[in-house]
Image: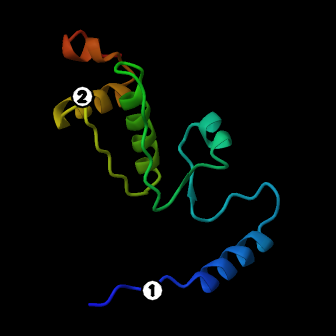
Amino acid sequence: MSPRKFERRPSLESLVDRVDQQRPGDVPSDTVPTGFPSVDRILGGGLRRRDLVVLGGDVGSGKSALALGLALRTAQQGTGVALVSGEMDEERLMERALAIEGRVAVDELRGAKLNDQ
């Protein structure tokens, strides 16, 4: 199979057409809101479909919590999400997701210190 040749002109023309048709303040159709209004404002409306988003930071700085929160809220809108963590296994991610959805601290969930409220 021969390599696919990148044709710049149709892609550029398509982009220019899309930008010309977009009105100020409109969110592009390939944008998915994160569910966090302050994050959406910074990102121009949300995450772009087909983009790979990588969060970096110190251990314990909240990367996984932010990524999981973004993934959960985006998935709740019906958009497919893939989450890869280099620091947490599947069980810990699910534990955090349950804590986020249940609006409880992870420590309370781990220690079975939950009440029926």
Q: Earlier in the sequence, mark 1 or mark 2?
A: 1
Q: Is residue 4 left or right of residue 7?
A: left
On screen, 82 above or below 109? below
Kindly check if marks 1 and 2 are in contact, taking CB atoms under 8 A apart as contact.
no
Which residue appears at 32% of the width and 25% of the height? Answer: 99
Residue type at mark 1 is Lys
Crowd tier of the residue under label 2, counting other residues whose Cα lies within 10 Å: few below 14, some 14–19, many 20 or above: few
Looking at the rendering, in which quadrant would you find the N terminus?
bottom left
Residue type at mark 2 is Glu
Q: Which residue is mark 1?
A: 5
The answer to whether one can see residue 88 in this image is yes
On screen, 56 above or below 9? above
Q: How far across and how far down the image is residue 72, in percent?
A: 40, 41
Which residue appears at 66% of the width and 78% of the height? Answer: 12
The answer to whether one can see residue 114 in this image is no
Secondary element under disc 2, as helix, strand or loop, is helix
Q: Is residue 110 left or right of residue 9?
A: left
Res. 95 mark = 2
Which residue appears at 78% of the width and 73% of the height? Answer: 21
On screen, 34 above or below 16? above
Which residue appears at 73% of the width and 78% of the height? Answer: 17
In the image shown, does 95 or 15 lie closer to the viewer? Answer: 15
Res. 27 mark = none
Q: How far across and how far down the image is residue 116, in percent?
A: 30, 16
Q: What is the tally of numbered marks visible in this picture? A: 2
